[in-house]
Amino acid sequence: MKLRTRLTAWYAGVFLIAGVALIGLNYWLLAEWTPLAGGVATRAIPAQTPEVASRFSTLEAAQLPADTLVFTADQVKADAMNTVLWQSVIALLVAAVIAVWLGWVVAGRVLAPLHSITTTAHRLEAERLDQRIELDGPPDELKELADTFDGMLDRLASSFDSQKRFVANASHELRTPLAVQRTLIEVALAAPDASDEVRRLGAHLLDTNERSEKLIDGLLVLARSDRGLATREPVWLDEVVEDEAESCAALADEKKVTIEVRTRRYLVDGDPVLLAQLVGNLLRNAVLYNVPGGSVTVELDQELVVTNTGPTVPAQAVPGLFEPFRRLRDRTGTAGSGLGLSIVQSVARAHQGSAKARPNGGGGLVVHVRVPETGVRQAS
């Protein structure tokens, strides 16, 4: 039940309680009232309207006209109380209907600032923190809440700007020395007088350098996706899947793993680079953590589903695979950095989607990624 409905119900309930109490008080006061002593006599006139004659406490009934009606004091009191009660109930019901309508209108006006706060919060994104409520009005609790929310947005905007600058600087500062190291190692290995020991050491250093570059690239992608999307554009996810499958073909041949792709036209609104990272990480993980002669199946229909064969994955260990640097013990010998599924989940969330996994029967993993579809179809 919405807050406006609850406030209206409370307002109407309090009104009804007060109305019932007022009717009860009036009924009690009327019960203490003593009508005319001795009774009342009325006489019918031609218009059929009762006419009050007078008090007849001193007259005998035989002295009254034949068409005179005589009411006792108890009868007058009972009729008055019954009339007052029913008229009060009808008036209360009509007033209750009006009170409900007024309560709905007043609650809407009171909650209007909250709707403004909610609308502003919905428009916010990591790259669009320039929205502010700037609520006008008296310095009440709602004004204080809006000002506090605006202050929080100012601090968040400053924090995100600092993080953006840090990621950009880190990307340059971390990649440059690794590129220099790789060049120096390759030059040393190309020397004609390089010994076998130097070549073995150089090959090991190149492998370490490559793993460091992949780790840094993964961390930068993870940081970028966690910040949200700076821009959005229409992206055919099925084309991204097919391109990434072709890119992983060489790795699959090396690992003796077959890749089968089944897709349909699927348009999303997002970042093509991050979506390519999502699909590429899924496919590389499915190939790397497989067995010789295994298979990888990619299906894109209502969602993206990547299924691979491989070692048995305990169900209780699956949630931890989405955390950075969390891998199963028998996977530590692979070339992965432990960020693949973390990046998948982060990119999916940046696109208002989700990622989950479950063990595959007989070994391996099944990963489900849901990215909202725009609903646009290409003309056939």
Image (cartoon, rainbow, N blue to C red):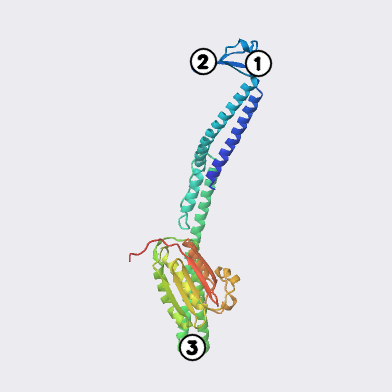
Residue 219, horizontal then vertical, whole percent = 51, 68
- Report the number of discs: 3
Q: Residues within 10 Å of mark 1 (few under 14, many from 20)?
A: some
Q: Which residue is mark 3?
A: 194
Q: Secondary structure at mark 2?
A: loop
Out of 257 and 55, give the one closest to the viewer: 55
Write the residue at 51% across / 35% down. 98
Residue 115, horizontal then vertical, whole percent = 49, 46
* Three-letter amino acid code of the residue under disc 2: Ile
* Three-letter amino acid code of the residue under disc 3: Ala
One can see residue 207 in this view: yes
In three-dimensional space, the C-alpha distance between marks 1 and 3, rounded to whole angstroms, equals 135 Å
Write the residue at 42% across / 64% down. 271
Q: Secondary structure at mark 1?
A: loop
Residue 142, horizontal then vertical, whole percent = 54, 43
Residues under numbered marks 2 and 3 in contact, where contact means CB atoms less than 8 Å apart:
no
One can see residue 209 in this view: no
Out of 75 and 369, give the one closest to the viewer: 75
Q: Which residue is mark 1?
A: 38
Q: Which residue is mark 2?
A: 45
Mark 2 or 1, nearer chain start: 1
